[in-house]
């Protein structure tokens, strides 16, 4: 599996502070290629133009929420194989079931620690160091 430094990540969240905290956490884990977008619509546009290995997306966002973004990613042949983690503070059973049906790779519950982030990432990619 690729080392963290080789994995291209896209963070999608409408709150810039959350995007920055997550980016800093990823940097601590050795990730070097981190892009950020504020909603699902911007994320789709970015993904169709830029090779990406992983999307970490908030669930609750205006314009296009994380579940709609996941469905959009999975329905596009250019992006359908991108790993997808939903970041959420409300992991309701319905959300989890819908996300699993849509092809989510994992969930990251807020608040999280860097150690928990590593654990979630390694369930998707295997060892990242």
Image (cartoon, rainbow, N blue to C red):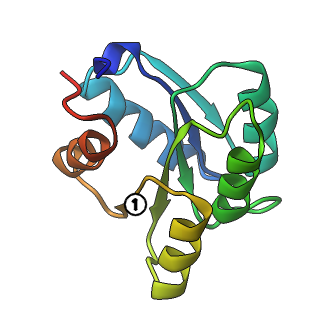
Dividing the picture into quadrants, the one containing residue 22 is: top left
SS type, badge 1: strand
At horizontal 44% and vertical 71% (from top left) the residue drawn is: 89
Q: Left of 47 or right of it: where is 12?
A: left
Q: Which residue is mark 1?
A: 107
Q: Quadrant of the N terminus?
A: top left
Q: Quadrant of the C terminus?
A: top left
Q: In this rendering, is residue 52 above or below 122?
A: above
Dividing the picture into quadrants, the one containing residue 112 is: bottom left
Q: How many marks?
A: 1
Residue 126: image x %, image y %? Answer: 23, 35
Q: In this rendering, is residue 12 above or below 86?
A: above
Residue 99: image x %, image y %? Answer: 55, 68
Q: Left of 88 or right of it: where is 59?
A: right
At horizontal 32% and vertical 18% (from top left) the residue drawn is: 2
Q: In this rendering, is residue 66 above or below 96?
A: above
Residue 127: image x %, image y %? Answer: 19, 30
Q: Left of 19 or right of it: where is 1?
A: left
């Amino acid at each position: 599996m690729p080392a963290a430094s080789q994995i291209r990540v896209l963070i999608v969240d409408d709150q810039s502070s959350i995007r920055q905290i997550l980016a800093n956490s990823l940097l601590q884990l050795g990730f070097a290629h981190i892009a950020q977008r504020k909603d699902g619509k911007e994320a789709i546009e970015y993904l169709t133009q830029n090779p990406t290995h992983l999307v970490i997306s908030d669930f609750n966002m205006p314009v296009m929420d994380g579940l709609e973004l996941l469905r959009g990613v999975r329905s596009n042949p250019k992006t359908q194989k991108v790993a997808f983690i939903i970041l959420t503070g409300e992991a309701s059973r319905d959300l989890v079931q819908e996300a699993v049906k849509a092809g989510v790779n994992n969930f990251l519950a807020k608040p999280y620690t860097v150690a928990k982030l590593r654990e979630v990432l390694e369930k998707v990619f295997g060892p990242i160091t």
